[in-house]
Image (cartoon, coloured by chain):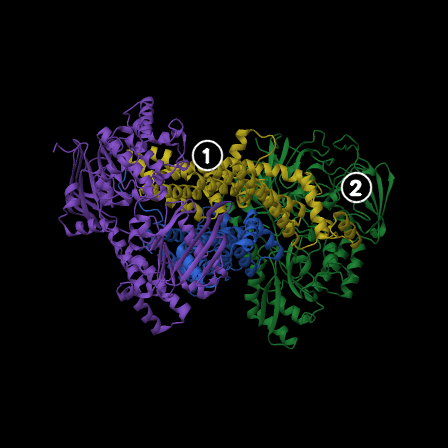
């Protein structure tokens, strides 16, 4: 209901939004360089950490299957651990898994569960717990991660701490897949998710959905050099200005999802710093390739040339992000096609492509709504102005935010949308561009693309994969139905009292694991 | 005369809009003396009375002159001076006691408040004194009376309570502002007698403000006649009443004394209206009990009675207004439906109603032309020129200048408004006009003129009047027949002459004898004839 | 009507100014309401006396456009609510009986549910488009208008000149038009002013909840909301629309006070 | 008089019932299927159907109303569709919060408003009167959330005296609680005071022109006594009325303030519920609000009856 200027992760995007993979390239603002130094400074134990988090509701629930928004995700990571973790350098590192081994073809995997870990209720972690936890998301389930777990055809215990995992087809990115924050580990047979028990850094004390929660330190937490503070209080603050006020009046130590428009103003405040994290979340204009006039590649190219990406980035995101090249793979992804030339704003080129399509002017209607992302309508207005020069007239049709995803997205021939980051190029490309994907929101079908995508997935040789992915990006960029002008960063503000804060390529709050990593300076 | 207890010199009072309400009035009041201030509305009577307390009503300012109470000057003076005099030395009795009492407080408390506030008495003393007054003023069951709330006692009793309240501090001066005007004649006498007794008993001086010469005649030693805020003449009551010097005073006296009939008695024409065994109910209580009457063309039937006698209800019933009534009404031979909604437009046209208060009877937002013209339009379809002429004619008929047509009611005086009401009734060319207290809101001389107008119209047009009033003086002069009502029942009915000539039976008699007369000894005479009831008050 | 007092003149002047904005706002605006020509919350500069809003649009222009939108919406809503409420109220008063009873009951019931909440549900249900917005507010508001006009009409209807008209056999329409309406005009006009202010703030409130006038169209309430974060940084951006709202409200109230004054005569040196 | 009061009570109950009908009907128009809202993205048609049956969404409207009302009567408000928790729990604590905040605000604003109203009435036309009038105007003239924001700016961000968030939780000390809720309460005070003050003034002035007040002046009484003993008692009814109205507003109209201060009250909760199509919650909270409104009006009317000497002391 509140109109934040940063896209909230709607259920649709979120259900598959696993940790975004990306090579270490912390787009870090000066403020958080300072943070990096803090990281060296000696940590201190104790104190109560107060977090003001936006993105929670009274219907929240800590059931790993139905985590739907920022607040419960952060809270879940306080109580529970995942199998793997994405670190600040954006590599998969072990968490409750000690290690993993693919067989040739990356179809069969052998997972090793960490030993000597106990749950808050004293139970010792073993393979059964992991099996149970993963199975929560398989088969007939309400799990939001169902589709992520779908490729897993078989899971079996091969030892007290050993698991054999079989995929329907080879996938070298399985570890990244497992970093999905839904895949949290609870004790075998656990069902009381109102009071979840996990192996996490903090222990459940009180929890009021959508309002506040208080968890206390887990005295025998297995992970070294973490969980510094005695307790964490989460205060749910969905209204952006309320959140900012709380931060500025020092009532909380950190807030997430800053308002792009005021970040620069916020930075003036000496008591806090802004943490900026580049990720895979991007905003796009979707053309339905099965509906005229978008069936014609020239039309698509004309529209792609008719947009001024820099201006859009500047106005919609205040420059907190990076320009996109009409494909969904972020610069931070290890398979990002560096050599692919950036498509410029070129009205003449647009005109040229219209000619190719046998037109000298074009008139299209764009369905826009701030449901797509905060400021989407403003963005549309900018695009409208840009396109004029290219002889393209874009009429903006404002759609109600209510039911936008049901009534407009994937239905309107030309509409606005956005995608949360995906951990791997493969997942991103599959989800939105694989012809058979249920979320192929441009209805784009390209046999070559499909074939190469499947081929690349099973390869374990990264060099080879990089080659293919570059190719795929090229195809999407030139032929695809999505105009992707920009990627948006994640922005947090943290008090200078906090130590140990770094920028993190995945979501806000250091991949939602901020609580266990930071400490309150003495 | 001994040096005055109240001395007002060259009093100037200015209204918020800058009008002068009084121009250089001098007043001297000797201890124990009763000075009558007489005049029509707007004469400045009340203004002077209030000035005696250094008070200007509704934003009026005392802009000049001096007011001294005994040795103390309050105008010009400090607020403190005035506060100490008010209630303590000079006390005020308003016309409507009902409005002058705080509805949320017990009478007893209000009656002693001033005494306690001014510290002239301790509570026990004050209460004792209050109870004495209550007895002197013959208020019912004196023990419990102080515990009652204003709405729990009758108008006459409230008026007496008000007087008692004014006496709380044994003031030197009472300012009595039309203290009996709002009361029924019979009650008026009681209050008058008690008041007079009280004043004499405690030797309190008083300014007695009224428009009724006859009343003032009974009580005051001297009289000041005022008009438009100026003194017309003053002198002993005797002198003023018996040998008025000024023409204006003469007219006042004459009007009050008048008893000759305005219209020659006619033999009534064919019956126009007949009412048989009419009953009217408001909710559970019955307002009229089997009232029957007949009225002929060109005849005037007066319905007299005190408040609560049901005379107005009767008028409204004939007009077809009450929610629920029983009985039979015939108009010009035809059945007259009980509710006006059921009556044909022609019937509505032929029965017209003129109200007591012209101010609320005229739509303040319509010009006189619209008001008078509407019936012409509605009933006779007059338009444009014809309409304008019709309006002009009617204005002439009621003796108003033609240029009034363009005015709004607000710009007219009370009398003129009432004339407009009459004109509106005439416009419908009715056979019957119901006059509900048409003169009682008007000043005597104006009322006189309106009565003459009505009489003239009747002679010209053979109108039948149903004349509702409490003023027997009027009845005697205008009505062919009179019908006396009490508590919703007809007490007596007959030719006016017979009704008004002795010997009188019970209620009718009380009613008639209670009408004050100008003879100064009238009240004493009345007391002599009436038993001990009032005697004790003296 | 009494001649305007000093404060009343101020009020009238204010209203006049806003009337101009209502009529000519957009034409006076140097820039379009959607044109992004500066940096968000940019400071005033030549040609942009009030600086820029959160999207870098010219504040002055937004204000002028927003004025037309805000005033227009409120005005429309209130006009409709009166167009509905007054006849209903008068009829209820004149007709009385079951007509009155049923209508009054219904209105009372509706008024029991807080306006904001009713509006919330309706707007959620139908989606907040301008017509829906206006109609919703209008209908919710008309309940109050109904109550007032009913009471007023009952008051006047009881007076004798109205009785005369009825006895003359006039129809309801005449009674309403000629006898009642002219005599209840000033309290109704006054109420109109107050309702207008209320609606104004109400729309602002709805905008706060994202249900008011939708972007990119400017409306003062929405502008306050959109720019509100700036206030904690000591920027003026949100102050302008807020001030615009405040001044209008004050203006209306001044005029209304004047119109309603005189009901209780001023008291001079009476103590 | 007691008969009148009983009648009024009956009327109140009746109205409440009507409101329940209205609320139920009103909430039915909310679009979007609850079942699919609950199950979310990957809801299969079969699952939807099952859930619909469980929720009784397939039953006829009237039947649903009756069962719903029965539930209410027996204190069973059903379960939240979205979270499955019992509505009574969810609503209870938040209603409590709302009421407490309202009480806090009322305790300050009502006496203050009435006293000020009396003062401006007594000193009608004085500078003081004018100034207060303008101040009152200023308060009603600003959107309430903006007022709140200004307060935050001054008292939290700049002075740092009071927290910007009304962050309350079970078992917090009264002192803490007051500290936390002072700013929102203050905002509400500012919003509500103006109207009460002006109403008190008008009501009082209306009475001041009555002739029994003149009588009081003419007794030589000074202003304070005239006002307190003779004017005020007779102006009580309208004042009580407006006070009740504003208290009702404090309870039902504070959504915005709650949002600004992130206060965990019923208003915001309901907005959330509406957005989520969580009918049981919406209905329950709407009815709770309506009930508060009806109740307060009833109290006001009954007070008016009780304050009226004519009714208190019949002939």
The image position of residue A242, as x and y in percent, is 54, 44
Residue D313: numbered disc: 1
Q: Quadrant of residue B93?
A: top left
The quadrant of the image that shows the N terminus of chain B is top left
Name the disc covering residue B498, or none: none
Gap in Å between the C-alphas at discs 2 and 1?
76 Å
Chain B display color: purple
Lateral position of residue B248 relative to residue D30, left or right: left
Viewer-nearest of discs 2 and 1:
1
Q: Residues within 10 Å of mark 1 (few under 14, many from 20)?
A: few
Q: Is residue C232 above or below residue C183?
A: above
- Of A359 and B52, which appears nearest the observer? B52
Q: Nearer the viewer, residue B289 or B422?
A: B289
The residue indicated by pointer 2 is: A133
From the top left corner, tell me how far across and down residue B482 is, in percent: 35, 52
Front residue of A202/D104: it is D104
Q: Tag 2, which chain?
A: A
Chain letter for the part of the structure drawn in yellow: D
In the depicted view, which residue is nearer to us: A205 or A256?
A205
Q: Quadrant of residue C176?
A: bottom left
Mark 1 secondary-structure assignment: loop
Q: Quadrant of the C terminus of chain B?
A: top left
Location of residue B88 in the rendering, given as x and y in whole percent from the top left corner: 25, 30
State the image quarter where residue B52 is shown. top left
As helix, strand or loop, the secondary structure at mark 2 comes to helix
- From the viewer's perspective, is residue C79 above or below residue D16? below
- Chain C colour? blue
Q: Chain of mark 1?
A: D
Residue A397 position, x and y percent, is: 60, 64
Circle 2 crowding by C-alpha within 10 Å: few under 14, some 14–19, many from 20: many
Hue used for the chain lettered A = green
């Amino acid at each position: 209901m509140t109109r934040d200027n940063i896209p909230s992760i709607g259920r649709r995007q979120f259900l598959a939004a696993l940790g975004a993979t990306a090579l270490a390239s912390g787009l870090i603002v000066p403020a958080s360089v300072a943070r990096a130094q803090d990281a060296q400074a000696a940590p201190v134990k104790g104190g109560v950490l107060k977090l003001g988090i936006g993105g929670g509701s009274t219907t929240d629930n800590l059931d790993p299957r139905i985590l739907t928004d920022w607040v419960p995700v952060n809270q879940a990571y306080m109580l529970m651990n995942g199998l793997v973790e994405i670190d600040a350098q954006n590599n998969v590192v072990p968490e409750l898994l000690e290690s993993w081994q693919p067989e040739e073809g990356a179809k069969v995997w052998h997972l090793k569960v960490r030993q000597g870990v106990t749950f808050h209720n004293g139970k010792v972690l073993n393979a059964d717990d992991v099996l149970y936890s993963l199975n929560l998301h398989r088969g007939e389930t309400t799990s939001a991660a169902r589709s992520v777990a779908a490729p897993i055809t078989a899971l079996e215990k091969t030892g007290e701490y050993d698991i054999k995992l079989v995929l329907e087809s080879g996938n070298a990115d399985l570890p990244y897949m497992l970093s999905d924050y839904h895949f949290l580990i609870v004790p075998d047979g656990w069902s009381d998710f109102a009071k979840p028990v996990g192996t996490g850094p903090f222990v459940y004390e009180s929890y009021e959905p959508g309002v506040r929660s208080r968890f206390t330190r887990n005295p025998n937490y297995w992970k070294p050099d973490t969980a510094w503070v005695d307790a964490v209080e989460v205060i749910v603050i969905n209204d952006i200005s309320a959140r900012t006020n709380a931060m500025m009046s020092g009532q909380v130590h950190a807030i997430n999802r800053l308002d792009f428009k005021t970040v620069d103003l916020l930075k003036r405040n000496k008591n806090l710093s802004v943490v900026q994290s580049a990720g895979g979340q991007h905003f796009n204009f979707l053309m339905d390739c099965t509906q005229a006039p978008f069936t014609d590649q020239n039309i698509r190219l004309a529209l792609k040339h008719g947009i001024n990406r820099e201006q859009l980035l500047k106005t919609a995101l205040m420059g907190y992000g990076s320009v996109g090249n009409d494909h969904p793979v972020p610069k931070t992804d290890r398979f990002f096609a560096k050599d692919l030339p950036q498509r410029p704003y070129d009205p003449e080129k647009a005109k040229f492509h219209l000619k190719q399509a046998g037109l000298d002017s074009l008139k299209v209607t764009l369905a826009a709504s701030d449901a797509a992302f905060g400021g989407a309508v403003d963005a549309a207005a900018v695009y409208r102005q840009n396109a004029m020069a290219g002889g393209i007239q874009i009429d903006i049709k404002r759609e109600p935010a209510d039911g936008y995803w049901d009534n407009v997205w994937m239905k309107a021939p030309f509409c606005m949308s956005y995608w949360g980051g995906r951990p791997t190029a493969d997942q991103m490309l599959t989800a939105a561009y694989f012809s058979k994907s249920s979320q192929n929101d441009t209805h784009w079908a390209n046999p070559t693309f499909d074939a190469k995508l499947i081929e690349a997935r099973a390869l374990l040789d990264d060099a080879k994969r990089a080659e293919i992915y570059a190719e795929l990006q090229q195809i999407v960029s030139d032929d695809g139905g999505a105009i992707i002008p920009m990627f948006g960063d994640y922005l947090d503000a943290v008090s200078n009292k906090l130590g140990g804060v770094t920028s993190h390529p995945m979501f806000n709050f250091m991949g939602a694991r901020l609580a266990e990593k930071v400490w309150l300076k003495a | 005369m001994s040096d005055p207890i109240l001395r007002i010199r060259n009093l100037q009072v200015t209204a918020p809009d800058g009008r002068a309400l009084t121009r250089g009035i001098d007043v001297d009041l000797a201890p124990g003396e009763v000075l009558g201030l007489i005049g029509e509305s707007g004469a400045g009577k009340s203004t002077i009375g209030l000035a005696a307390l250094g008070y200007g009503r509704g934003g009026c300012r005392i802009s000049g002159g001096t007011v001294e109470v005994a040795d103390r000057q309050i105008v010009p003076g400090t607020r403190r001076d005035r506060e100490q005099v008010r209630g303590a030395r000079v006390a005020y009795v308003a016309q409507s006691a009902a409005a002058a009492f705080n509805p949320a407080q017990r009478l007893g408390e209000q009656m002693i408040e001033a005494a306690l506030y001014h510290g002239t008495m301790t509570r026990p003393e004050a209460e004792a004194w209050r109870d004495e007054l209550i007895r002197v003023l013959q208020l019912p069951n004196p023990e419990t009376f102080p515990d009652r709330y204003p709405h729990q006692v009758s108008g006459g009793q409230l008026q007496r309570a008000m007087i008692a309240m004014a006496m709380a501090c044994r003031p030197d001066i009472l300012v009595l502002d039309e203290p009996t005007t709002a009361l029924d004649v019979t009650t008026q006498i009681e209050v008058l007698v008690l008041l007079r007794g009280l004043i004499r008993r405690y030797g309190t001086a008083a300014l007695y403000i009224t428009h009724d010469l006859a009343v003032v005649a009974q009580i005051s030693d001297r009289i000041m006649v005022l008009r438009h805020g100026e003194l017309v003449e003053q002198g002993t009551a005797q002198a003023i009443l018996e040998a008025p010097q000024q023409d204006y005073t003469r007219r006042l006296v004459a009007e009050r004394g008048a008893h000759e009939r305005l219209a020659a008695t006619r033999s009534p024409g064919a019956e126009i209206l007949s009412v048989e065994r009419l009953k009217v109910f408001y909710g559970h209580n019955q307002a009229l009990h089997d009232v029957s009457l007949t009225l002929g063309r060109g005849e005037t039937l007066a319905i007299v009675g005190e408040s609560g006698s049901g005379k107005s209800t009767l008028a409204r019933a004939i007009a077809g207004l009450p929610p629920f009534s029983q009985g039979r009404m015939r108009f010009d031979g035809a059945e007259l439906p009980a509710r006006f909604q059921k009556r044909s437009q022609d019937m509505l046209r032929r029965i017209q109603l003129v109200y007591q208060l012209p101010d609320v009877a005229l739509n303040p937002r319509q010009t006189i032309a619209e008001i008078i013209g509407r019936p012409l339009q509605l009933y006779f379809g007059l338009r444009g020129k014809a309409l304008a002429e019709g309006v002009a004619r009617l204005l002439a008929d009621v003796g108003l200048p033609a240029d009034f047509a363009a005015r709004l009611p607000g710009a007219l005086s009370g009398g003129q408004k009432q004339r407009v009401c009459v004109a509106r009734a005439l416009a419908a060319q009715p056979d019957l006009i119901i006059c509900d207290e048409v003169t009682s809101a008007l000043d005597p001389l104006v009322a006189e003129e309106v009565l003459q107008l009505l009489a003239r119209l009747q002679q010209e047009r053979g109108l039948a009047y149903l004349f509702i009033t409490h003023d027997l003086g009027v009845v005697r002069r205008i009505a062919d027949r009179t019908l006396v009502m009490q508590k919703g029942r007809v007490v007596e009915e007959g030719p006016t002459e017979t009704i008004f000539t002795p010997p009188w039976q019970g209620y009718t008699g009380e009613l008639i004898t209670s009408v004050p007369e100008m003879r100064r000894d009238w009240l004493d005479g009345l007391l002599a004839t009436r038993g001990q009831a009032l005697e004790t008050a003296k | 009507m009494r001649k305007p007092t000093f404060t009343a003149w101020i009020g009238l002047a204010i209203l006049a100014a806003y009337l101009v904005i209502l009529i000519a706002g957009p034409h006076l605006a140097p820039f379009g309401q959607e044109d992004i020509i500066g940096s968000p919350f940019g400071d005033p500069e030549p040609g942009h006396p009030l600086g820029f809003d959160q999207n870098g649009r010219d504040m002055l222009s937004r204000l002028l456009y927003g004025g037309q939108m805000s005033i227009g919406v409120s005005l429309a809503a209130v006009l409709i609510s009166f167009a509905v409420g007054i006849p209903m109220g008068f009829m209820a008063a004149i007709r009385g009986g079951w007509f009155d009873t049923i209508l009054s009951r219904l209105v009372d019931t509706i008024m029991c549910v807080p306006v904001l909440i009713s509006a919330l549900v309706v707007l959620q249900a139908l989606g907040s488009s301008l017509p829906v917005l206006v109609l919703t507010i209008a209908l919710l508001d008309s309940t109050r208008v109904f109550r007032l006009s009913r009471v007023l009409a009952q008051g006047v209807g009881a007076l004798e000149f109205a009785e005369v008209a009825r006895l003359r056999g006039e129809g309801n329409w005449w009674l309403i038009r000629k006898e009642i309406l002219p005599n209840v005009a000033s309290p109704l006009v006054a109420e109109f002013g107050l309702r207008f202010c209320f609606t104004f703030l109400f729309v602002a409130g709805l905008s706060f909840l994202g249900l008011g006038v939708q972007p990119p169209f400017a409306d003062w309430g929405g502008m306050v909301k959109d720019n509100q974060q700036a206030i904690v940084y000591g920027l003026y951006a949100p102050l302008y629309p807020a001030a615009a709202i405040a001044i209008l409200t004050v203006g209306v109230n001044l005029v209304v006070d004047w119109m309603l004054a005189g009901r209780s005569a001023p008291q001079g040196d009476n103590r | 008089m007691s008969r009148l009061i009983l009648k009024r009570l009956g009327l109140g109950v009746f109205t409440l019932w009507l409101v329940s009908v209205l609320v139920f009907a009103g909430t039915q128009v909310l679009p979007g299927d609850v079942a699919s809202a609950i199950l979310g993205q990957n809801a299969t048609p079969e699952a939807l159907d099952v859930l619909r049956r469980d929720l009784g969404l397939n039953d006829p409207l009237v039947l649903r109303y009756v069962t719903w009302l029965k539930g209410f009567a027996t204190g069973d408000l059903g379960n939240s569709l979205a979270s499955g928790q019992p509505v009574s729990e969810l609503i209870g604590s938040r209603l409590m919060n709302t009421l407490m905040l309202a009480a806090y605000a009322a305790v300050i604003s009502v006496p203050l408003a009435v006293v000020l109203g009396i003062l401006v009435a007594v000193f009608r036309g004085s500078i003081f009167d004018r100034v207060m009038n303008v101040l009152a105007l200023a308060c009603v003239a600003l959107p309430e959330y903006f007022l709140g924001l200004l307060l935050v700016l001054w008292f939290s961000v700049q002075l740092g005296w009071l927290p910007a968030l009304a962050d309350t939780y079970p078992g917090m000390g009264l002192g803490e609680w007051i500290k936390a809720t002072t700013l929102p309460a203050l905002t509400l005070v500012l919003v509500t005071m103006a109207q009460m003050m002006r109403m008190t003034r008008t009501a009082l002035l209306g009475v001041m022109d009555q002739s029994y007040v003149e009588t009081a002046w003419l007794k030589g009484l000074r202003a304070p006594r005239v006002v307190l003993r003779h004017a005020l008692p007779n102006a009580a009814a309208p004042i009580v009325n407006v006070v009740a109205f504003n208290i009702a507003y404090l309870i039902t109209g504070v959504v915005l303030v709650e949002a600004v201060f992130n206060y965990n009250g019923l208003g915001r909760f309901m907005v959330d519920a509406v957005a989520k199509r969580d009918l049981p919650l919406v209905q329950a909270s709407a009815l709770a609000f309506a009930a508060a409104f009806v109740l307060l009006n009833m109290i006001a009317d009954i007070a008016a009856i009780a304050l009226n000497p004519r009714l208190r002391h019949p002939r």
